[in-house]
Image (cartoon, rainbow, N blue to C red):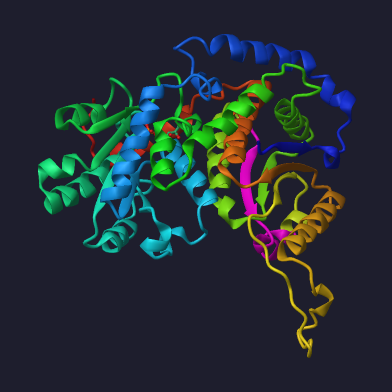
Amino acid sequence: MGNIKVDLKNTHITEKKIMKYANEVLDIHNYLHEKCKSKKEYLGWLQLPTDYDKKEFDKIKKSAQKIREDSEVLLVIGIGGSYLGARAVIEALTNTFYNMMDKNERKSPQILYVGNNLNPNYINDIIELIGNRDFSINVISKSGTTTEPAIAFRIFREILENKYGIKEARKRIYVTTDKTKGALKILSTIEKYTTFIIPDNVGGRYSVLTAVGLLPIATAGIDIDKLMEGARFAQDKYSDENLKYNECYRYAVVRNILYKAEKNIEILVTYEPKMHYIIEWWKQLFGESEGKDGKGIYPSGAEFTTDLHSLGQYIQEGRRNLFETVINIEHSETDLKIHVDEDNLDELNYLEGKSLDYINKKAMEGTIAAHVEGDVPNILVTMDKLDAETLGHLLYFFELACAMSGKLLGVNPFDQPGVEKYKKNMFKLLDKPED
Ligand code: PA5
């Protein structure tokens, strides 16, 4: 089973300081585990890896198989928690250039994402990209009323219906939404679309291991059993209420200690470009969960070594309110060696025989040392490898850490009241009729 280790030594926070949180962590742990049994609390994700709808899971696999057989493109329509998890897992576990690969090599449909912005160029480019090819739609919205995905669905449903006729189009639309509420649910019932339910007690940004994430992920050919297995392993591992041994809670506590020491920006760093959307997913998870009541660590991300040539200067010598969490992948899936060059005009022969992954790791070690010396505390999260199991583990790790972190901060990590503000203004400007 792909494991995850958390190394906190480069935060220079003492064990004594961490363990001062033991009782508070225990209380929050007990609260989370007691309340997760209630259908009213947004805590369903806590036991999701063991307590999920098996029938729905099989239906997801069947639908994914059908899409793989009859579509060259799957269009995932959703925003925020309704697409970031799927995109994060798919991009982490497939070829970096998956969507650009020849379809025979890819062996799975292209996965394209819309409904995550309101930009006409973006949508027109996707329409052009799909062209005459066969496609299906998975529209995902828990509320069923979010404007961005609703507009995209209206546009692409029309295209699908014009292409296949209403009857056949219906067989190519997959809806993931609430079991009773929302415009999307009503539409889906009337049109008899294949529908997947987002459990009541699982909020958007904690929903990647429901149909929200699993249908697109399975369509991309990723083993969702393995993903759940990894999450299950994590659920068991982090059920230990003892702060001394629970690395997930230790990460949450150390973030809180750093925050109190004015380190109020966390940069999640990767040296693997495939993890770009894992960072985006994490940013949403922590940003929406913690940023409220005038509090919260600002979650940001960086890809090294790329961003060392853009943000590196700031991180090394700018305002000292940063800390870094680096995700290290211990065993790279592939590697390549640097060969000797007789002329050595590029002066790289000192790297002869060394592998690129080794060089990448040395860049990481050197950067961590430099940043720590520059007063940027470092948390190192090491994944054994980048596969479905370890990723399932990582997703659960961050979800639980986020809940613990938000509670330690004294905020509700499961709501997002601030998101309504821009919508209200936008609706007013667009003359939307009152409900
Ligand atoms: O985490 C959340 O709840 C939000 O970010 C939602 O996922 C996002 O706003 C999309 O909402 P919906 O799924 O209702 O369309």
Q: Quadrant of residue 353?
A: bottom right
Q: Residue at x 59, y 40 (%)?
A: 391
Front residue of 35 and 395? 395
Q: Is residue 299 magenta?
A: yes
Q: Where residue 356 sits in the image (x, y, percent)? A: 72, 65
Q: State which region is magenta.
A: 296-313
- Answer with the quadrant where ligand 1 appears in the image: top left
Q: Is residue 163 magenta?
A: no
**Horizontal side of residue 265 vs 431, given as left or right:** right
**Horizontal side of residue 113 vs 193, given as left or right:** right
Tell me if residue 424 can be seen: no
Front residue of 424 and 202? 202
Q: Where residue 224 sits in the image (x, y, percent)? A: 47, 37
Q: Work out whether 322 lies above or below 44.
A: below
Tell me if residue 346 can be seen: yes
Q: Residue at x 20, y 45 (%)?
A: 157
Q: Where residue 360 sits in the image (x, y, percent)? A: 73, 61
Quadrant for the N terminus in the image: top right
Q: Residue at x 47, y 42 (%)?
A: 84
In the current view of this chain or complex, which residue is farthest to the bottom?
343
**Horizontal side of residue 221 vs 399, given as left or right:** left
